Amino acid sequence: MPRPILATIHAAALQHNLARNRQAAPDARVWAVVKANAYGHGIERVFEGLRSADGFALLDLEEAQRVRELGWRGPILLLEGVFEPRDLEWCSRLDLWHTVHCDDQIDMLAACKTHVGHRVFLKMNSGMNRLGFTPARYRSAWARLNALPQVDEISLMTHFSDADGGQGIAAQMACFAEVTRDLPGERSLSNSAASLRHADSVSACDWIRPGISLYGSSPDHPEHLAAEWGLQPAMTLAAKIIAVQDIAAGASVGYGSKFVAEAPLRLGVVACGYADGYPRVCPTGTPVLVAGVRSRLVGRVSMDMVTVDLTPVPEADMGTEVTLWGRAANGVVLGIDEVAQAAGTLGYELMCALAQRVPVQVAG
Ligand SMILES: *Cc1c(COP(=O)(O)O)cnc(C)c1O
């Protein structure tokens, strides 16, 4: 028997979360962001659930090729554009739209002998200071691209730095609107946080680019829980109890003996550890579901196991299912964001870090 740990990808949840994003921007088309192997879910595994998207956005040519191999004929956007001239040939071959964020990429296009016109998304750095042309240089970049015979169509895009926080998107929106006011072309502005939190401001754009919300994690946890945004978990990580320990008051658990029981305690040893992608830094008290009932982690996370408190579930025993995040068999949900918060990080990082050794199934 394989080690009793399993990740489940919920196709119906992906579909639901996509619909939730459409609801936020009913007139916009949706790039389903599937970079990083669909945020750790697996591009092939999420494809069915997300196939009603208008396009797929990602970073790697290899991932773009996989989307084409699944039979997708619609738009695919490279969010960081090309990295070297040869990539442009792949863009033509695979019919990829690509971001242009710097002069080097325009140089590559200008030097490229291509028979098919390229469809590009010209990126403005409106304050994130990561990728894109500054507002002062944006229009000249547009003019340069527009003069190239290699370029068919130019769309306009930017990315928000604070859509999930108090600063919001107003300043970047204003900057983008001002600089692009009379430029033709489709507009693509918002990630999940902007689409959900600032639906009124961004609903007029042509393309939204949700990632994390498709996977059922809240873009602004803990201000809003995923459920408050109407999102459903797209990934469940569950494992079984492989040993039970009854320990006496004063006994400790796990490496470093960090946790000491104040009273007699029944513990379940669960077949999931940091080598499966469960964060080692999760402290005692991190929530888990034992047979769908909330309980807590105790002691240190080790490579292949964690220990959980069985007090709330006296009937738990060998083989009882423990949900590390996602939906338990009884329907109870433990948000990946809650576990991420206990680990001092975001749901993004946990889902992306699901380890290769964890078997994965796709469910409806
Ligand atoms: C990753 C990414 C997104 C998606 O962001 P989420 O916060 O996951 O919704 C959108 N746009 C760009 C440019 C990205 O790199």
Image (tube, rainbow, N blue to C red):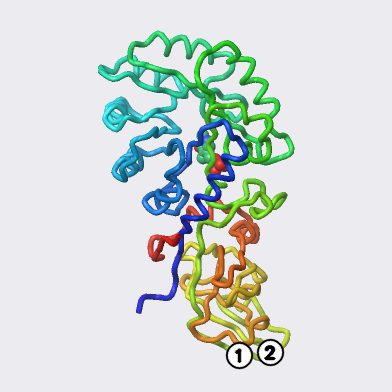
Tell me where residue 237 appears, x and y as whole percent.
50, 65
| Residue 1 picture quarter | bottom left
Q: Measured from the top left, where is residue 324 in percent x and y?
A: 55, 67
Q: Secondary structure at mark 2?
A: loop
Q: In the rendered structure, are the residues bearing label 1 and label 2 in contact, judged by CB atoms less than 8 Å apart?
A: yes
Q: For label 2, count other residues whose C-alpha is less than 10 Å away and answer few (under 14), some (14-19) or many (20+).
A: few
Q: Amino acid at mark 2?
A: Pro
Give the distance between the C-alpha atoms of the residues marked 1 and 2, in whole angstroms. 7 Å
Pointer 2: what residue? 264
Quadrant in the picture for the C terminus: bottom left
Rendered image: mark on residue 12:
none
In the displayed structure, 42 sits above or below 87; it is below
First in residue order: circle 1 vs circle 2: 1
Q: Is residue 220 left or right of residue 157?
A: right
In front of the other: 102 or 118: 118
Label 1 sits on a secondary structure element that is strand
Q: Residue at x 45, y 53 (%)?
A: 40
Q: x, y (%) of residue 251?
A: 65, 87
Is residue 224 positioned above or below 265 on the image? above
* Residue 70 quadrant: top left
From the image, tell me which residue sits under label 1.
246
